[in-house]
Amino acid sequence: MNDVQLPSAGHQATPARTLTQPCILHVCTSCRPTGMPREPQANRPGFVLYQELSDAIDRSPLRERVTVRAAECLSVCPRPCGIALSSPDSWSYLFGDQKATVTETTSSILDCLAVYLESPDGFMPRKTRPKSLRNSILGRVPPIKEVGECT
């Protein structure tokens, strides 16, 4: 029999991540609605969202802790536009259904980043995320633990 310990039903924060640790906001630049032409890239809603978020982060206090990266494809094609949040020793999140050129979307993503950065391990219970990011979540992945380490 294997001595594997299953995680408890409740979430327990891991103190591994520091509150000054940076995170990456990945934005799918190929996201577009079905039937929309692939070119020019600058017209794709995902590319527009990437530009808007890059500009918004550059103008915000989050610029010291958030890096915005273009992702060629996050494979959320049925639910464009896609974004993901990741950080070492932290939960990672994948969201779809983000709207390009909507100020409210950019603001909600910035608010979500602030919540993510304040959590010791990036864990964001549903009620702590901005409303628009509660229903658009596609998945979350727990932090990678060292081999043999269980919670």
Image (spheres, grey):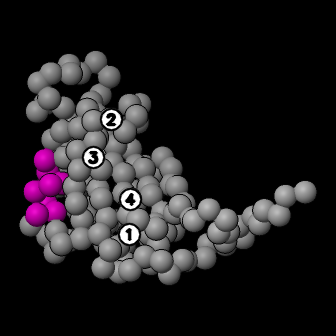
Q: Residue 118, position in %: x, y?
A: 37, 78
Q: How packed is label 3: few (under 14 Cα within 10 Å), some, or many (20 or more)?
A: many
Q: Which mark is residue 27?
A: 3
Q: Which is nearer the N-term, disc 1 or disc 3?
A: 3
Whether 113 is drawn above or below 68: the answer is below
Q: Secondary structure at mark 4?
A: strand
Q: Which is nearer the N-term, disc 4 or disc 1?
A: 4
Q: Which residue is mark 1?
A: 116
The alpha-carbon separation of the residues under discs 1 and 3 comes to 16 Å
Q: Which mark is residue 73?
A: 2
At a point 36% along the width and 57% down the height, the residue shown is 85
> Is any part of residue 126 visible from this angle?
no
At a point 27% along the width and 36% down the height, the residue shown is 72
Q: Secondary structure at mark 3?
A: strand
- Of circles 4 and 1, which is in front? 4
Q: Nearer the viewer, residue 136 or 9?
A: 9
Q: Residue 93, position in %: x, y?
A: 44, 55
Q: Which is nearer the N-term, disc 2 or disc 4?
A: 2
